[in-house]
Amino acid sequence: MSAAAEPRSAPPTLQLAALADDTRWRILELLGVGARSASELARELPVSRQAIAKHIAVLEAAGLVSSERQGRALRHRAIGASLSDLAGRLDAIGRQWDARLERLAERAEATASAGEGATRP
C-alpha cells in the first residue's frame, strides 16, 4: 500500500468554487464517511465513473480530497484538515459580520433613544 499524497494548500476561493457543484458536494459527503473508489462512487451517484474522476480531480486540486493506490484500486478520501481550515475561515468571517451588525444595532438604538429624549417635554 502506497502512502497518500500530501494535501496541497489551496486558496479558499478555489475550495469554495470546487464545493459550489452539487455533485462534488455529494462526493465529498460520501468520502467523509469513508474512502471510496470512483467506481464505488459512481454506483451511489447518478453520474458515470469518468465524470466522478473529473470531479475528484477538481476536489484534489482544491486540496479537499486525496487519493491512495490500494492494490489495483485508487481510493479517495476527504481531507479533514483542509475542510476544518476552510470552516474556521468562514466562521471568522461570520463572527466579524456578527460584531459589525451588533455595533450597528447599538448605534441605531442609541440614535433612537437620543431622538426620543429630544422630543419629550
Image (spheres, rainbow, N blue to C red):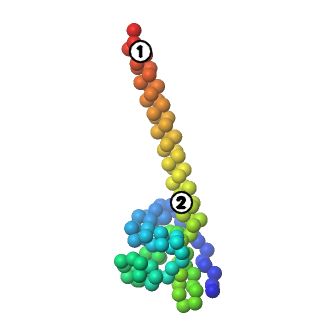
Picture residue at 57% right of the left edge, 67% below the top = 80
Give the side of residue 97 with respect to residue 80, left or right: left
- For numbered disc 1, what is the local secondary structure? helix
Picture residue at 40% right of the left edge, 20% below the top = 115
The answer to whether one can see residue 72 in this image is: yes
Residue farthest along the left direction in this orientation: 46
Question: Taking 83 as reference, is 92 above or below it?
Answer: above
Q: Amino acid at mark 1?
A: Ala
Picture residue at 60% right of the left edge, 77% below the top = 5
Q: CA distance from mark 1 to mark 2?
A: 48 Å
Q: Label 1: few (<14), some or many (≥20) within 10 Å? A: few
The answer to whether one can see residue 61 in this image is: no
Quarter of the image with the C terminus in it: top left
Residue farthest along the bottom direction in this orientation: 72
The residue to which callout 1 is attached is: 118
* Residue 106 in picture, x, y percent from top left: 48, 31
Residue 86 is marked as: 2
Residue 110 is marked as: none
Picture residue at 56% right of the left edge, 56% below the top = 88
Q: Amino acid at mark 2?
A: Leu
* Residue 60 in picture, x, y percent from top left: 51, 73
Quarter occupied by residue 70: bottom right
